[in-house]
Amino acid sequence: MTPLRQRLRPLLLGLAVLAVDAAVLLPALAWSRSVIPGWKKGPLIDPAAPYSPENAIVLAAVAACIALDVYALGLFFGQRRLGRRAWLPVVVLALALVAAEGSLRAWLAVDMVTYFRPHPTLHWQVRPHLHDFQEGGDTGKITTNGDGMREVDVPRRKGADELRVLVLGDSSNFGHGVDGDEVWSSVLEELLAPRLVGRELQVLNGACPGWTTYQALVFLDEIGLAYQPDVVIAGFNNDPGPDYLGDAERLTPEPLRTINGVLWRSELYLLAREAVLASVRRLRPVAYQHYQAREAGRSPTYGKLAEQEAEALVPRVSQDAFVANLRALHALGAQRGYRFVWVDMPINRSEPDLVERYVNPDYRQAAQALAEELGFPVVQADAAFQQRPPGRLHLPRHVFHPDPRGHRLLAELAAHTLAAEGVIEGLEPMKPPPAPPPREQLAPGRLRLGCSSLTPVHAHVAVVLREHPELLEQAGLALELELFDSGKAQGQAVAEGRLQAFFTCGVPAVHMLAGGPGARAVTSPGELGRIAVVARRQAAATLTDLAGARVGLVEGSTPAMDWASWGLGLGATVVDLKTEELEPALREGRIDAAVSWDPWVEQWLQAAPDELVVVAERPFWSLLALDSGWAGAEPEQASALLALIERALELAAADRAHYDQAVAELSGWPVAVVRAVADRNHILAGQAGAGLERGPQAVEELMRAARFAHGPQADGATLWAPEPRVSPGSGDRIPAPPEAGAPGRSSGSASRR
């Protein structure tokens, strides 16, 4: 071989490798767009997951390219150095497969879109060895051990003086949407450990989102019993869920199941397997027909299938199998030395459409009947949650998932049941969680309106209603006005269902509407002022001047939401401060700019016009929310209330000097600040034709706030009520506001709490 050919061989090999890679990757990319998307009930439905057919084909192709490249290059250079050896191709092939596997694992560790992984017998499980993993904005931080168990850091074998409680379940018991220390299993350990004398208590979370009682039995057999539990607590919601196959029928038959148990540890095998199956589904007409039949179950009612759905779908676990699984969990405890406890999982009844779709009461009743028959304890969580205001203990728009307060109550209920039923020997008696105080009842025909006394526009309405109680009489409304000097206090009142109507805005609106029992936004009284970035003049004249600067704000607030957009690419350091700390920090130079809203922004600028400058701003919008139950039952009163509020703002606009002064006295803001903020509201500014309206700016602001507070998938549209239907003539009972200075201004007031 000539020297030239010898020098060209590596170059030609490299070109050949690139050509082969292109020949593999380009068809794979095209093919991935044409395959039938996989659909499986449970967490692996996520189309962004690496194991979905579309992504598996691409990742498997990349892995194949890595393996081919390593094999070709390794064989070429190996033969040049070692000559032709019979064992060399085998060794290089093994190295190529190891390189492909290692590359996939490295990539998935960085781009771990989902925290689930397929499993040969459990169908899926939580990935092992996660550390503070967070999927989007909808989950809490997740840390797992080698068995995929959340917040578990103990060896399988327990100590001599150790007592273990194992919790089984689905996403509710796993703790979807909350951090690990907030999950009720973690709180239960916190509650019980100090009360157990002479023994160390560990509560282990063995739950996984999407699981059923079938998977609970499999998990116990393969993993859970190795932890030697003394108590097993279980609660599930997913058994009635429809699927094209029952959970038990989806198992691979032996001996393939045993082989899969080894092969499924490999990411290369999992992705290649899914890529092949996706291609088969695409090429076989009968497979496509099966897929179309499965499509009928994308949004079915659990356990209550429509005729078309019932033809193609079955419950993941039938009711008979569900009862049999509970019997088996109880019987296994007698054999293996643990006490079995069932949890009647709590339902969020403030979301009736979701309850109708996802809750099958027959399964729940069957579990209660079996508990009476066999004598195992039941944590009556659902009954206890029903005693509290609906929606207050669950994540917004979630029918099953408790929020941190719900998890703590669930832990308290479980602790009381374990002590009262003598499940754990030596456990000191515990009082049941205190029952909530009875909800305050308004007299028939009365309603309560809540608003902030510190917010101009809202406070203008309050002042007018206090000075003109005759407006309430003319509107036919028995209204009580409740003023608040903090958003936290108003949010508590909303959550407790004390308010039939209230003013709010931005991110606070999201939390109040999500925490209130059925409260929904209906309209907007217009602008509340502006949200602005206020900078020290010597630090910045424009927004871009804040690159690398220190910017103060209140984390989680509406101004923080806006800074997330304004600050993109600036590399600024965010300093989390309280609202009252922002101005001193700004003027003392501890921060270069502050992001806040009126009336604070207006007060800062009026106090130091030569020191401070606005470098970015936008208007923000008031919202009026009504309790949906009250508004639905009293539509005429709801319409009259909207007309009353609009008239109150018109009256304030007609005599601004007086009402601005009255708001200043009520709120404590300087009258010049109140006047400047009110000038930004189109109704108070006296614009022709101005009134309450559900404008696109107010709608979009609430949508943005929902995504900011609860993640990009949050649907802010659910926080709006349907367009209100104002009864004809409902506002005609309220006379036009008197001229400024005209008689009729009363010193009386609406009832103030």
Image (cartoon, rainbow, N blue to C red):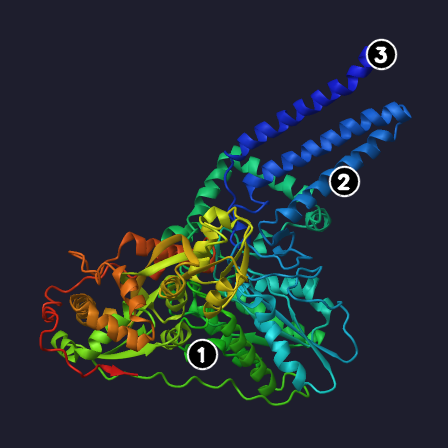
Q: Earlier in the sequence, mark 1 or mark 3?
A: 3
Label 1 SS: helix
3D distance between C-alphas at marks 1 and 2: 54 Å
Give the residue type that dot 2 points to. Val
> Disc 3 marks which residue?
3
Neighbourhood count class around disc 1 (C-alpha, 10 Å): few under 14, some 14–19, many 20 upward: few
- Which of the 4 quarters of the picture holds residue 168? bottom right
Q: Residue at x 32, y 66 (%)?
A: 673
Neighbourhood count class around disc 3 (C-alpha, 10 Å): few under 14, some 14–19, many 20 upward: few
- Which of the 4 quarters of the picture holds residue 325? bottom right
Return the residue nearer the eye: 345 or 567: 567
Tell me: 515 left or right of 169: left
From the image, which quarter does the C terminus lie in?
A: bottom left
> Disc 1 marks which residue?
383
Label 3 SS: helix
Return the residue nearer the eye: 447 or 535: 535
